[in-house]
Amino acid sequence: MNGGLHLLPALPLSAEAFAPFGQVIECAGHAGYAINEGSSQRFTDLAQLEADAEGRLALSIFRAEARQAPFALSCLERHPLGSQAFMPLHGQAFLVVVAETRPTSARAAPESLRVFVSNGRQGINFRRGVWHHPLLALSAGDFLVADRLGPGDNCEAVDIAGWQVGIAR
């Protein structure tokens, strides 16, 4: 406990550990091949992006401010109509918080949360419907985001501030 917060450990982000929640976007561990007359390497299909039939995938840039420790968690959200991917554009590390089960604000369940830390060269793609905390950038910077745009409510949120959960780092 730290100031009343139940602190969760932040584990290194790996494809194996993150697999139940989506994909880690990185070249490491993937075979690339030469393109553009040998001047580039292509690493293909690093994330399985999803959108329902009425939406479309869009690329955006999120300009994030650095979050300061202690990292108290306030809400979890999910996107039931499409996946959501984040890739740091300037090599900045970030924290990824996911829930193994559907959260409720009434019942604290910090044991259902997993916390990962990206090395700054890794992005992530949340599968459709995965509960996660909004972006927790460790330093200011831009993130390329691929997610679904279109009709319907694609963001459901649950307030977990009452859980008194934070991240040990």
Image: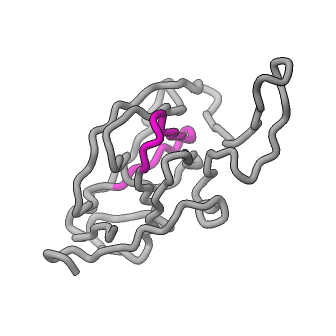
Give the residue at x 58% y 57%. Answer: 21
Nearest to the observer: residue 127 or residue 71: 71
Work out whether residue 82 or residue 5 is closer to the camera in this orientation and state it. Answer: 5
Specify the color scheme.
one colour
Which residue of the protein is positioned furthest toward the top in this rendering? 37
In-image side of 165 versus 114 (left or right): left
> Between residues 160 and 143, which one lies in front from this camera angle?
143
Residue occupying the far bottom of the picture: 1
Q: Quadrant of residue 57?
A: top right
Which residue of the protein is positioned furthest toward the front in this rendering? 39
Quarter of the rendering containing residue 5? bottom left
Instruction: Name which residue lies at 30% across and 74% down.
Output: 7
Q: Is residue 2 magenta?
A: no
The magenta span reads 76-93
Query: If the image is split into quadrants, where does the N terminus sit?
Result: bottom left
Q: Position of residue 169 (x, y in %)?
A: 34, 67
Q: Residue at x 42, y 44 (%)?
A: 92
Above-or-below relation of 117 to 100: above
Q: Is residue 66 left or right of residue 100?
A: left
20 sits left or right of 145 in the view: right
